[in-house]
Amino acid sequence: MKPSLPKGTRDFNPEEMLRRNHILNTITGVYRRYGYQQIETPAMENLSTLTGKYGDEGDQLLFRILNSRLHESKKKDQVLEEFQRSLEQNINSDILTERALRYDLTVPFARYVVMHQHEITFPFRRFQVQPVWRADRPQKGRYREFYQCDADVIGSDSLLNEAELVFIISEVFRSLNIPVTIKLNNRKVLTGISEKCGMPEKIIDITVAIDKLDKIGESKVIEELSAKGINDTSIEKIKPFFGFSGSNQDKINFLKTELKDSATGTQGVTELETIIGLCKNEQLELDITLARGLNYYTGAIFEVKANDVEIGSVCGGGRYDDLTGVFGLKGLSGVGISFGIDRIYDVMLESGLFSDQLLSHSYTQLMFVNFGDKESQYCLELAQQLRTKGIAVELYPENAKMKKQMAYADANKIKYVALIGDSEMSSDTVTVKNMQSGEQKTIPVNQIAHLITQG
RNA sequence: GUGGAUGUAGCUCAGUUGGUUAGAGCACCAGAUUGUGGUUCUGGGGGUCGCGGGUUCGAAUCCCGUCUUUCACCCCA
């Protein structure tokens, strides 16, 4: 049979893993320096945990897992009936599917917090690095399986958390040498806008439409707004927000006057002003049209774009005031961000930001050439001794031709090769070749470790 | 889910208006060199031309279907 992969999934070879881990280690290193602790959750969740949290669009994109052994079910009539219904409309029937693959890390985290609330000391800073799955149609920078690197702090309303998350974003992308713009907005401002035009119940439609402004332009957005049942007088009241440009401070002043009649809107503006004041970050840009589709955001929202590569957002997040509420724990506010390492990888590759040094040598520091049974047994013991000293060592497993063994060391970028044949064994020496310089010398066996660690 | 492009060796790609045994570079394997990799030289292996139908005396080439990858919409990391 012909081997193949499910659409939108990929293998990662050793070279790619070195680069992916470089990104990953950069992010988790920063997270740790800010006090975040790692957790993991299962790949699959109960479907009911996930549905209704991401909006209609998100629900459609969940990978559902068909229940096992349906052919042995005692309720086949019911199964058939539910299946037929599922062909007509998007329903969730436990008898067909009760589990789904996780869609993000935030909702499973909210579930985790509620289930473990008695062991957690709040405020709780956690980070999590795991794959998520979305039944989207793949395209550039969009995969059906991809990794998210989340950091969230839950149980604190303080805007210091937002500010620290901006520091984290800034530090990560500075470490990776990726020029970015950190876009910031606040859902309360969007609420204020929908209140101002007299249609607070249409906030979702309005925000989704506004979000598209930079993509499809003002006229198309207006078209979409009327299609969603927003009348012309309301649209006129939204319009001023479209075209406004200026510095962050200009935008804040503008919003302050425009939204002065909306308590929520004014609250949002104040929050934005506080966060921007705390961050003092030049990459931070207040973007009134930033909306983000995920339903659960209630306060600050972030989205990070790479300046030099067209690929969608490389990091996103925001504040959610009551995500744990649906699981029975009310009044717990959280805020978090998520890096998409697959996209960051694509950006770095396209911009040539991976240093050659990442791939210049392997973890293995020394390889023993295999000259036969007697010699390989001797080398096996020597290798064990070196490993206890923390040196990464390989012994070539076959008594193959020298040329083949050397070519292996070369292909794997192993810096040192040790040759121990009859003459070396009888004289307690080892011939060590530096594969980068080509230099070779014979030294006493007990000096190998020193040579390798000291160069 | 809607629309466009794409598919020839492990990789990057040639392949004329449809015409005989489908090519190149790189990679791989072997030898030159039985204790020495990278350079060089010589030789070699490897392709149901994505898959399935159709048109034709004849299809990698034309037509239909299907799948993959990819781009856009939608949404997002």
Image (tube, coloured by chain):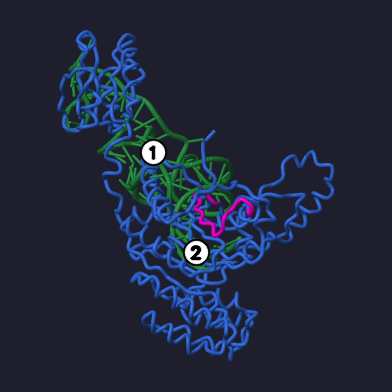
Q: Which chain is green?
A: B
Residue A386 forms part of the magenta stretch: no
- Disc 2 crowd rating (10 Å Cα; few below 14, some 14-19, many 20+) is many
Quarter-of-image position of residue A62: bottom right
Query: Callout 2: helix, strand or loop?
Result: strand
* Residue at 62% from the left image edge and 63% from the top image edge: A323
* Residue at 48% from the left image edge and 81% from the top image edge: A218
Q: Colour of chain A?
A: blue
Q: Quadrant of the C terminus of chain A?
A: top left
User: What amino acid is found at the position of numbered circle 1 in the picture?
Assistant: Pro
Q: Describe residue A200's horizontal placement relative to residue A254 as left or right.
A: right
Residue hosting label 1: A14
* Residue at 65% from the left image edge and 79% from the top image edge: A201
Q: Give the label on residue A317, or none.
A: 2
| Marked residue chain, label 1 | A
- Closer to us: B47 or A105: A105
Q: Nearer the viewer, mark 1 or mark 2?
A: 2
**How many numbered marks have been drawn onto this rendered protein structure?**
2
Residue A219, above or below A14: below
x and y percentages locating residue A141 in the rendered image: 44, 57
Task: Compute the Cα span from label 1 to label 2.
Answer: 31 Å
x and y percentages locating residue A33 in the rendered image: 40, 54
Q: Describe residue A216's horizontal placement relative to residue A296 as left or right.
A: left
User: What amino acid is found at the position of numbered circle 2 in the picture?
Assistant: Gly
Q: Describe residue A250's horizontal placement relative to residue A454 as left or right.
A: right
Residue B38, above or below A223: above
Is label 1 in contact with label 2 (beta carbons under 8 Å)? no
| Marked residue chain, label 2 | A
Q: Which residues are magenta?
A: A117-132
